[in-house]
C-alpha cells in the first residue's frame, strides 16, 4: 500500500507540474516584446480576410413591411432628429400590447436573473485597455484597454470644427455594426419569433458578460434605424446577436470558454423563445488560435531610456516631473501614462513612463532612487496618424535636457539618426501588417484584441 500511495502522489504532482508549465509557456508567448533597431520582424503573410468581411454566421435581417419601406439615403447634416424620434415612438407604441401580454413572464424571469446581472459583472483588467470602451461595464471600457495596454482606426482626418462626423453606412442593405466585429468575435445570431423590448432582454443577460477571460457582447437590431446597438431599455429589437472574443492578450478562446459561452447563449435563447445558430466548436477554437498567433506576431512594445549623466534621481523628483508634464499615475501606482485625444476627441493612452520597479503609491519616494527612466510605446494600441514614436522621442529628449541625461535604447546605446530610420522602417512594416488584416493600429477592434 505504501508503494502504491507513493506512485499515486508522484503521478498527481507530475500532472500538476505539466499543467503549470503549459500555462507558463502560453503566457510567456503572449508577453509583449521590445523592438530593437536590429530586430528582424516576422515574415509578412497575405491577409486572411476578404475586402468585404462577413461574420462566421450571418445574422438574419427581417425585411421591413411594405408600408414602412423607404429609400435608403446617406445621413446629412440637415436631417431632423425629430424624424427618428417619431419613428421610434411609433414602433414602441405598436408593440405595447405584445409587451403587456408578456408582463407576467418577464416578472418571473427578472427576479432570479437580476441577481445574476448584479453579481455577474466582469472584473476588467483595468490598465490593460485604457481606452477601448464598449459598454460601461465590460469595456470599463476601458479607460485602460489593457495592462497589456490600450488595445482606433485613427486614420481618419480630423474634420473641420463646424462639420459633423457622418455615421457609418452599411453596405448592401446590411445593418450598421456597433461593437461586435467579425474580425475578432465569434458571432451567434438569435432569431426572435417576435419583437422584444430591451426591458425584457436585459434581466436575462446576467451570464453574458465574460466567458472565462474573454469578453462577451450582446446587441439588438433596430429595424427603424437599420443598425445594431447594445441592448437598451425602452428599445424594441427584431433580432439579437451575441459574440465572444476569439482572442486577447490572455490567449486564444479555448474549448472550456467556448462551452461556457454556448451554455449561456442557449439559456438566453430558451428564455426568449428564440432560435440560435451555434457555430462549430472545433472551427471556432481553431480560428481563435490563428488570431492569437497573428496578434502575438504584432504585439510589440518599443522602449527608449533616459539615463542620468550624474547622480541618481529620487522617485519623488521623477514623480514631480511626470506630474508637471501632465502624465497620469496608473491605479496600481507602477507607471505614469501620457494620454492624447483621437479624431473623435476621446482620450487614449499614448505611452507610459516607468522608473525601475518603483510603486509611486506604496514606496518611500524620498528613499527610492535610480538613474534610468523608461518610456514605453505599445505599438498596436497607438494610432499611426498621431506619430506616436516621434512623440515619445521628443518627450524623451525634453526629459534628457531638463534632467541632465541622455536618450538611449534598451542596449544603452545613444539613439542616432540611423537608429531612428531603422526603427521607423520596422514600425511601418508592423502598421502595414495590421492594416492588411483590417485592424489599423489604435482602432477600436485592435484595442480590444490587444487587451486583457
Image (cartoon, rainbow, N blue to C red):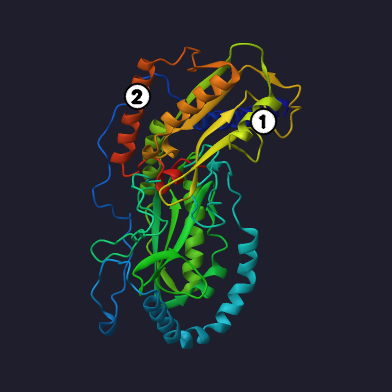
Residue at left offset 23%, top offset 63%:
172
Residue 136 in view (yes/no): yes
- Vertical order, 39 against 104 (above or below): above
| Quadrant showing the N terminus | top right
Quickly name the residue at label 2.
Answer: 41
Q: Nearer the viewer, mark 1 or mark 2?
A: 1
SS of the residue under disc 1 = helix
Q: Nearer the viewer, residue 267 or 70?
A: 70
Separation of disc 1 and disc 2 at Cα? Answer: 38 Å
Residue 253 in view (yes/no): no
Give residue 285's quadrant in the image. top left
Q: Nearer the viewer, residue 1 or 301?
A: 301
Give percent across and percent down for residue 184. Answer: 39, 48
Task: Tell me, for residue 320, which label it has, or none.
Answer: 1
Give percent across and percent down for residue 324. Answer: 62, 34
SS of the residue under disc 2 = loop
Give percent across and percent down for residue 320. Answer: 67, 30
Crowding at dot 2, Cα within 10 Å, few <14 / some 14-19 / many 20+, comes out as: few
The mark that comes first in sequence, 1 or 2, is 2
Q: Nearer the viewer, residue 278 or 51?
A: 51
Crowding at dot 1, Cα within 10 Å, few <14 / some 14-19 / many 20+, comes out as: few
Residue at left offset 45%, top offset 53%:
244
Amino acid at each position: 500500500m505504501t508503494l502504491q500511495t507513493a506512485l499515486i502522489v508522484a503521478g498527481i504532482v507530475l500532472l500538476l507540474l505539466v499543467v503549470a508549465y503549459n500555462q507558463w509557456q502560453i503566457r510567456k508567448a503572449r508577453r509583449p516584446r521590445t523592438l530593437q533597431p536590429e530586430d528582424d520582424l516576422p515574415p509578412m503573410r497575405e491577409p486572411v480576410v476578404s475586402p468585404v468581411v462577413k461574420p462566421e454566421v450571418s445574422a438574419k435581417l427581417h425585411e421591413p413591411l411594405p408600408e414602412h419601406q423607404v429609400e435608403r439615403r446617406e445621413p446629412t447634416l440637415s436631417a431632423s432628429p425629430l424624424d427618428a424620434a417619431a419613428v421610434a415612438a411609433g414602433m414602441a407604441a405598436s408593440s405595447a400590447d405584445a409587451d403587456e401580454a408578456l408582463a407576467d413572464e418577464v416578472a418571473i424571469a427578472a427576479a432570479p436573473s437580476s441577481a445574476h446581472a448584479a453579481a455577474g459583472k466582469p472584473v476588467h483588467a483595468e490598465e490593460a485597455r485604457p481606452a477601448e470602451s464598449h459598454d460601461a461595464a465590460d469595456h470599463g471600457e476601458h479607460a485602460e484597454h489593457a495592462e497589456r495596454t490600450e488595445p482606433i482606426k485613427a486614420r481618419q482626418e480630423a474634420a473641420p470644427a463646424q462639420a459633423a462626423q457622418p455615421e457609418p453606412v452599411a453596405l448592401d442593405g446590411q445593418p450598421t455594426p456597433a461593437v461586435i466585429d467579425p474580425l475578432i468575435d465569434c458571432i451567434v445570431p438569435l432569431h426572435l419569433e417576435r419583437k422584444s423590448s430591451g426591458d425584457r432582454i436585459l434581466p436575462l443577460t446576467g451570464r453574458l458578460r465574460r466567458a472565462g477571460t474573454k469578453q462577451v457582447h450582446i446587441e439588438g437590431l433596430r429595424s427603424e434605424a437599420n443598425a445594431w446597438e447594445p441592448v437598451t431599455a425602452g428599445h424594441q429589437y427584431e433580432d439579437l446577436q451575441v459574440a465572444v472574443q476569439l482572442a486577447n492578450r490572455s490567449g486564444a478562446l479555448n474549448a472550456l470558454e467556448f462551452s461556457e459561452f454556448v451554455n449561456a447563449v442557449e439559456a438566453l435563447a430558451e428564455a426568449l423563445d428564440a432560435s440560435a445558430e451555434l457555430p462549430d466548436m472545433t472551427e471556432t477554437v481553431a480560428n481563435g488560435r490563428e488570431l492569437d498567433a497573428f496578434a502575438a506576431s504584432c504585439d510589440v512594445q518599443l522602449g527608449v531610456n533616459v539615463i542620468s549623466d550624474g547622480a541618481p534621481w529620487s522617485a519623488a523628483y521623477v514623480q514631480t516631473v511626470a506630474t508637471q508634464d501632465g502624465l497620469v499615475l496608473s491605479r496600481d501606482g507602477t507607471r505614469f501614462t501620457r494620454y492624447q485625444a483621437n479624431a473623435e476627441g476621446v482620450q487614449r493612452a499614448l505611452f507610459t513612463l516607468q522608473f525601475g520597479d518603483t510603486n509611486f503609491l506604496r514606496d518611500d519616494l524620498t528613499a527610492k532612487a535610480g538613474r534610468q527612466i523608461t518610456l514605453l510605446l505599445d505599438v498596436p494600441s497607438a494610432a499611426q496618424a498621431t506619430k506616436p514614436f516621434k512623440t515619445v522621442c521628443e518627450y524623451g529628449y525634453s526629459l534628457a535636457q531638463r534632467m541632465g541625461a541622455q536618450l538611449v535604447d534598451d542596449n544603452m546605446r545613444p539613439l542616432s539618426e540611423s537608429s531612428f530610420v531603422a526603427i521607423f522602417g520596422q514600425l511601418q512594416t508592423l502598421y502595414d501588417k495590421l492594416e492588411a488584416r483590417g485592424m489599423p493600429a489604435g482602432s477600436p477592434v485592435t484595442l480590444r484584441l490587444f487587451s486583457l
